[in-house]
């Protein structure tokens, strides 16, 4: 046991998958832990698109950090905004305050970015926060409502055109959900419009969707999306977004697609703390802005600074960086907690090794793709596997029950009960 | 059957308890119905305080109007803002459009009001909409978070003082829930503060709380509130509210109570359409602004205009107006649908008669008061009765299951899982 006078102080920045896991694994280690987050909850990101499409409620996929950690006697939760790190003096800088650390674990993740075209954001919101999801939900369902009123055929077609930019898992999941909303959920809801006439485009700049999946599964996903009425356009980079249309490049020709709802699922940008750390320590950043970490997930020359999750570039295992997914962040969080523990007890841990258990993406009701290494499958079985894995990973048991009820309901009744238009109901579509 | 060429057009304004009930009861009547609401959902108001206190999610108590009415072939739902009624030409005026009616049912309800001190609103939000509930939830839980940071004892005590203005059912329910949050829910959550040290005041201008209940039940409720740590102050009118304090009058002396969270549950003001109708038809308004209606709930001299719910003053039964509650609105909605039907079929309906089935208010976990006419009781049994009645009245079966799971969870674990601080997380407390 460390003596009270000089307990090792660990500060964890960020309560996402990596930071929360590290904090939880430090429960019985004789250190004091402070977990800092600007939000009072941990968000289960993989289900966020289900909030954006009116399937689940925000609280079903968010658990308050204090509730999760209430019985961790060595842990403080601090609701604050981190503005920097003073590496030389080992201090985390907060908006009004600062905090000394012996070890800092930086797990601040990433946010969507627009490849230099930040002015597109108001017209094409991304999906990272609860607020993003509620705003996207508002735009989707408000577009159908505005269409029900519309008499001008051109304007009507603009209102019923939905463009999703980016063919990764989030883009695929959003496009599939939109296909189901148009064809199933809203089937009998309107009197003037036929929601199934909605046009849903999934636009991807490269030559394939789901780039981290095997090509055959990506192909299966595309077929499933087509069945839901989604047009998938590959090799179609976006060149402009405004309040009325998206402009894309197809075979060197520009095409303008009039649409009122655009969702951005095309790229992420790591937290600014990566640059702060690089500037202070000389650590290298990759092209995307992630910190190149040592085999034990520390910053070169700074064993007291760990970087994990979406903010870290760990390429020691396969030569290319690990993907920015929840399983990577969780395993990294677990690992750094072990390193901290072994330092306290004076042992040396092995390097970090990621154990890839596979990838899954949902396409629609009873349809998904799963890549579990040697086992690749799609369809209903993949969908069940997806549901099971995600359900089991939800933090609170109560939320598992609530999510299960809503999934079951949806499976049998195709209802999306959470499709409320909230925030500013008088605001019609963007901008 | 009416001929297609001249189907009677009914316009219902407002999708609350009264308007929705009227619309639903017109399903098989040979008329066309247009239900206008500015929101896309029906809100189950009596449970709104549970959203404001982090117990339920908004979607659990809100059902989209289109989903409820999807199989009503004679019914259109219109998401629009009503700006007036042109009584002479029988038109409902919308923000951009207008709509002809043969019969109009005005059910636009009420909103909280501040007895001429509208400038208090930013400091003391009321509880009428989903957005109100989310804002109040944010203020409550953000106050505890800010207190955890606070070092100045005076400021700390301000942050941990919660004032609820108004001792009606909503005020009592909010105060009870706050008592439980402070004493149970947050028990192990903080490290620097003891949430049970929070001071919760329920302030009422008249000489008793729950004025519509028998005095003995009001007394029981007060005892139950005291057990939860709530200070009840009767005969204490509020004279000022600002961002730092509430000023009250006690026995002719002014007292200032420093506090950072104030919730307004003290009064309601009927929709502006009451005045529009009065100006156009010469109908009388009562002191509160409600329309004095005829025994068949129409406006005197205008059998084509019905006014129901919180906007109507129906005093023909007992000499004093019926209260602004959900059961009154529901029964009035049912009744006017019957009147419309009998006009179409050429029969004459009897006058409206309200059948009072009693009142119930929840005070806390396993504690409520119930006044069912001859049967008056409180405690656990009243609580169970309250839960049962409210559960059965939720519109969608899925929501009944979701609410039941969350109530059960809360009963056994005292957890409020939906206590997210959303909207603007950087914003600390009011204003």
Image (tube, coloured by chain):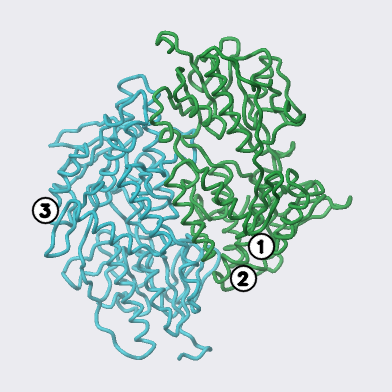
Chain colours: A green, B cyan
The residue positioned 69% from the left and 60% from the top of the image is A161
Give the crowd class for mark 2: few <14, some 14-19, many >=20 residues within 10 Å: some
Q: Position of residue A300 (x, y in %)?
A: 68, 16
Parent chain of label 1: A
Q: Earlier in the sequence, mark 2 or mark 1?
A: 1
Chain letter of mark 2 equals A
Residue position for label 2: A193
Relative vertical location of residue B215 with respect to residue B292 in this rendering, above or below: above
State which chain disc 3 sits on: B
Q: Secondary structure at mark 3?
A: helix
Residue A129 falls in image quadrant: top right
Q: Is residue A172 above or below residue A327?
A: below
Tell me how far mark 3 sits from mark 1, CA to CA.
57 Å
Can residue A360 be spotted in the picture? yes
Separation of marks 2 and 1 at Cα, in angstroms = 10 Å
Screen quadrant of the C terminus of chain B: top left
* Count of numbered circles in the view: 3
Residue located at (23% from left, 38% from top): B201
Q: Which element type, helix, strand or loop, lies under badge 2?
A: loop
Quarter of the image with the N terminus of chain B in it: bottom left
Tell me the residue at 48%/18% (across/down): A97
Is residue A161 or residue A74 the one in the foreground? A74
Q: Which mark is residue A160?
A: 1
What label sits on residue B215 in the rendered view? 3
**Percent position (x, y) of residue A110?**
63, 34
* In the displayed structure image, the side of residue B143 where residue A233 appears, left or right: right
Q: Nearer the viewer, residue A46 or B319?
A: A46
Q: Are marks 2 and 1 in contact (CB under 8 Å)?
A: yes
SS for callout 1: loop
Q: Position of residue B85 (x, y in %)?
A: 43, 69
């Amino acid at each position: 046991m460390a003596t009270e006078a000089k307990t090792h102080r660990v500060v964890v920045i960020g309560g996402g998958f990596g930071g929360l896991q590290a904090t939880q694994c430090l429960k019985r280690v004789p250190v004091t832990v402070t977990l800092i987050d600007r939000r009072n909850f941990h968000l289960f990101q993989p289900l966020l698109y289900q909030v954006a499409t009116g399937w689940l409620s925000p609280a079903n996929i968010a658990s308050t950090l204090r509730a999760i950690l209430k019985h961790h006697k060595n842990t403080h939760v601090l609701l604050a905004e981190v503005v920097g790190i003073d590496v030389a003096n080992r201090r985390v800088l907060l908006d009004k305050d600062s905090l000394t650390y012996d070890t800092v674990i930086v797990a601040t993740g990433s946010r969507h970015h627009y490849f230099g075209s930040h002015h597109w954001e108001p017209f094409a919101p991304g999906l990272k926060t609860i607020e993003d999801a509620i705003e996207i939900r508002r735009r989707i369902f408000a577009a159908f409502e505005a269409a029900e009123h519309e008499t001008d055929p051109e304007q009507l077609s603009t209102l019923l055109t939905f463009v999703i930019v980016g063919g990764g898992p989030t883009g695929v999941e959003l496009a599939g959900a939109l296909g189901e909303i148009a064809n199933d959920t809203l089937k009998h809801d309107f009197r003037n419009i036929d929601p199934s006439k909605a046009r849903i485009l999934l636009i991807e700049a490269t030559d394939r969707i789901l780039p981290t999946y095997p090509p055959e599964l990506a192909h299966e996903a595309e077929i499933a999306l087509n069945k839901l009425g989604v047009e998938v356009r590959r090799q179609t980079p976006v060149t402009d977004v405004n309040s009325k249309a998206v402009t894309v490049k197809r075979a060197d020709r520009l095409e303008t697609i009039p649409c009122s709802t655009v969702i951005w699922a095309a790229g992420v940008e790591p937290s600014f703390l990566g640059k702060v750390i690089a500037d202070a320590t000389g650590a290298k950043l990759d092209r995307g802005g992630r910190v190149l970490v040592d085999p034990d997930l520390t910053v070169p020359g700074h064993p007291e600074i760990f970087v994990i999750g979406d903010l870290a570039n760990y390429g020691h295992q396969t030569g290319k960086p690990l993907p920015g997914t929840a399983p990577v962040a969780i395993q990294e969080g677990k690992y750094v907690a072990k390193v901290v523990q072994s330092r306290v007890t004076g042992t040396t841990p092995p390097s970090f090794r990621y154990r890839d258990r596979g990838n899954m993406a949902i396409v629609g009701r009873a349809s998904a793709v799963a890549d579990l290494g040697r086992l690749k499958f799609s369809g209903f079985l993949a969908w069940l596997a997806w549901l099971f894995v995600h359900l089991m990973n939800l933090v609170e048991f109560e939320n598992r029950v609530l999510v299960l009820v809503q999934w079951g309901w949806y499976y049998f009744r195709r209802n999306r009960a959470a499709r409320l238009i909230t925030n500013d109901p008088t605001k019609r579509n963007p901008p």
